Amino acid sequence: MLDSFQDAFASCNLHNLGFQGYEFTWWNRCHMDQYVEEHLDRYNANIEWSLLFPSSKVYHINVKISDIYLLNLNMKVWMMY
């Protein structure tokens, strides 16, 4: 199944936008020796989107809401008339 996902990702010409901030986006809500964090959530875009929004940045925010951390997509949009 992972191969199918990666194939779809590649065929749509998607790329990861990267991020700034805390490394992880999920935790298992356990403590001490059973504590696990993972980087599961990502923002992805194709080249056309990236060209429309070249100043966009993704931020991982270290605030735990349930078992996920917040993600923020900051898009600076310049309007030309």
Image: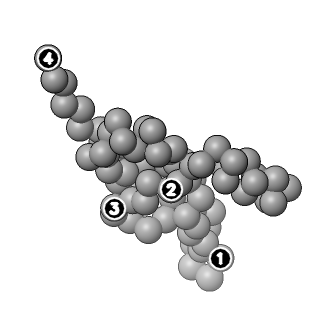
- Cβ atoms at labels 1 and 4 below 8 Å apart: no
Look at 59% across and 48% down and name the residue there: 13
Amino acid type shown at disc 2: Asn
Q: Which badge, 3 or 4, comes first in the chain's sequence?
A: 3
Residue annotated with mark 2: 16
Amino acid type shown at disc 4: Tyr
Mark 1 vs mark 4, CA separation in Å: 56 Å
Residue annotated with mark 4: 81
Front position in the image: 2 or 35: 2
Left or right, 76 with respect to 37, comes to left
The answer to which quarter of the image holds residue 62 is bottom left
Q: Secondary structure at mark 3?
A: strand
Mark 2 vs mark 1, CA separation in Å: 29 Å
Mark 3 vs mark 2, CA separation in Å: 13 Å
- Figure label count: 4
Mark 3 vs mark 4, CA separation in Å: 32 Å
Q: Which badge, 1 or 3, comes first in the chain's sequence?
A: 3
Front position in the image: 77 or 61: 77
Residue 36: x percent and y percent?
Answer: 60, 72
Q: Residues within 10 Å of mark 4 (few under 14, many from 20)?
A: few
Residue annotated with mark 3: 20
